[in-house]
Image (cartoon, rainbow, N blue to C red):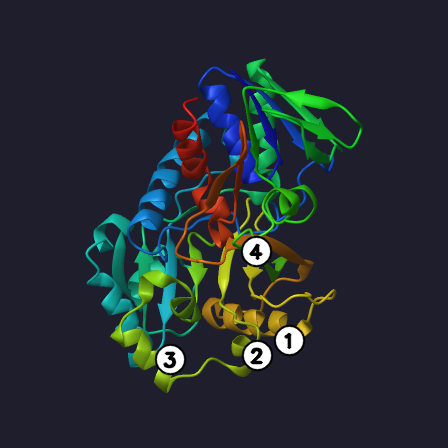
């Protein structure tokens, strides 16, 4: 079988990976010379802890298993089974963490409530003041700026993979074929459009009422910390954002303890992951209303820096990069992804939201199974 994959972000690349793994030939087409979108502009977290139960959690856990297997074969992916800690302060935040332990799927996530001393033993870089921390053993990380490149190099070594960069697919031609902006037609047995947040142009023509929206976020990265941050770190505002933490305790937290005004205005949480070079990726904000601002805003950076420093008990290293990114999210946020046959032999796979890096291997595996690859 010959598979045409449009889009070289993480979702498209793992679709190519599954096709090649199953013995098929793949042509992958990317409008940039290399992917430059949300697949690179993220934390690189394989984030199981906050996922909703049911299909979303099952997808995340399967993807976590797949990432570990791929990482063992491709060390350059930077897979690390580091887990995560969410430090809490005060009885209201502690109650949300305790409620999470009572979920029927708590064991599958690897939840455990640690004392402050136990959390510091797991992550000695956390020298700030906090009462306890929710540990999630199943969380992990990869290197987002290099993961697609590492996967691409492994695919090229297969001898059954061709990458075509700098080509924008403009048109679906008949069955199982697309035409790019150079006029070349690419024909296969199946075409999978994994266009990420690029929802205009061809995608809009194919699905005018696509139930997917775009979300903008801001993040930053520091110089090396100078010591190991041995786990990912989140703050209790992440309880408000991720569906796994919904509970009466969370309702009580929201009612009695408002977010700091900047965090509320920008729909913020702290997520923090250390890169292999020692720097920290820190964020993030969420903006849903179009048109998005064209500039980044300083107050959210100041807020997440203060929160991060309060857990680390020390000033952050110098900020090296600041950026904004845009990802695609199903308007029904309980859906893991939007997968739709849009023409004979042509499928669109988009809208995983902030789950793209986490869930993409399992999303692509499901596509491969459903299409009979």
- Residue at 64% over, 47% down: 204
Of marks 4 and 2, which one's residue comes earlier in the chain?
Answer: 2
Numbered badge on residue 299: 1
Q: CA distance from mark 3 to mark 1?
A: 22 Å
Contact check, label 2 and label 3, Cβ < 8 Å = no
Q: Label 1, label 2: how many angstroms apart (C-alpha)?
A: 7 Å
Marks 1,2: beta carbons within 8 A:
yes
Mark 3 or mark 1: which comes first in sequence?
A: 3
Structural distance between the alpha carbons of marks 3 and 4: 27 Å
Marks 3, 4: nearer the viewer: 3
Residue holding disc 2: 262
Q: Mark 1 falls on what kind of element?
A: helix
Q: Nearer the viewer, mark 4 or mark 2?
A: 2
Residue 183: x and y, percent? 79, 26
User: Outermost residue, right direction?
Assistant: 182
Q: Residue 69: give x, y in percent of width and height.
A: 39, 30
Compared to residue 342, the image places residue 312 above or below, namely below
- Determine which of the numbered discs, if any, sits on residue 254 in the image: 3
Q: Is residue 68 above or below residue 183?
A: below
SS class of the residue under badge 4?
strand
Does label 4 or label 1 sit earlier along the sequence? 4
């Amino acid at each position: 079988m010959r598979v045409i994959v449009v889009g070289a972000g993480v979702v498209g690349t793992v679709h190519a990976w599954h096709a090649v793994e199953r013995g098929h030939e793949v042509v992958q087409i990317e409008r940039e010379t290399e992917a430059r979108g949300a697949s690179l502009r993220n934390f690189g977290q394989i984030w199981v802890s906050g996922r909703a139960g049911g299909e979303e959690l099952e997808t995340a856990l399967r993807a976590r298993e797949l990432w570990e297997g791929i990482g063992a074969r491709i060390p350059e992916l930077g897979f690390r089974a580091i887990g995560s800690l969410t430090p809490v302060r005060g009885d209201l935040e502690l109650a949300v963490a305790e409620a999470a332990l009572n979920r029927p799927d708590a064991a599958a996530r690897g939840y455990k409530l640690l004392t402050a001393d136990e959390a510091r033993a797991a992550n000695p870089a956390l020298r700030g003041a906090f009462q306890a921390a929710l540990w999630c053993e199943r969380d992990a990380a990869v290197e987002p700026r290099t993961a697609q490149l590492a996967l691409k190099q492994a695919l090229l070594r297969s001898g059954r993979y061709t990458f075509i960069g700098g080509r924008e697919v403009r048109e679906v031609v008949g069955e199982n074929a697309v035409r790019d902006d150079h006029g070349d037609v690419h024909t296969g047995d199946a075409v999978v459009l994994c266009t990420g947040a690029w929802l205009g142009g061809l995608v809009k023509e194919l699905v005018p009422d696509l139930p997917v929206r775009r979300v903008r976020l801001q993040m930053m990265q520091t110089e090396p910390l100078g010591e190991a941050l041995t786990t990912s770190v989140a703050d209790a505002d992440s309880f408000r954002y991720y569906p796994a933490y919904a509970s009466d305790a969370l309702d009580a937290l929201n009612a009695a303890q408002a977010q700091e005004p900047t965090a509320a205005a920008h729909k913020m949480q702290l997520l923090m992951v250390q890169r292999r070079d020692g720097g920290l990726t820190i964020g993030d904000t969420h903006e849903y209303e179009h048109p998005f601002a064209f500039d980044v805003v300083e107050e959210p950076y100041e807020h997440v820096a203060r929160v991060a420093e309060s857990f680390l008990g020390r000033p952050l290293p110098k900020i090296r990069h600041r950026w904004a990114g845009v990802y695609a999210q199903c308007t029904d946020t309980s859906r893991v992804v939007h997968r739709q046959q849009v023409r004979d032999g042509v499928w669109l796979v988009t809208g995983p939201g902030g789950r793209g890096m986490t869930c993409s291997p399992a999303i692509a595996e499901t596509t491969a199974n459903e299409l009979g690859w």
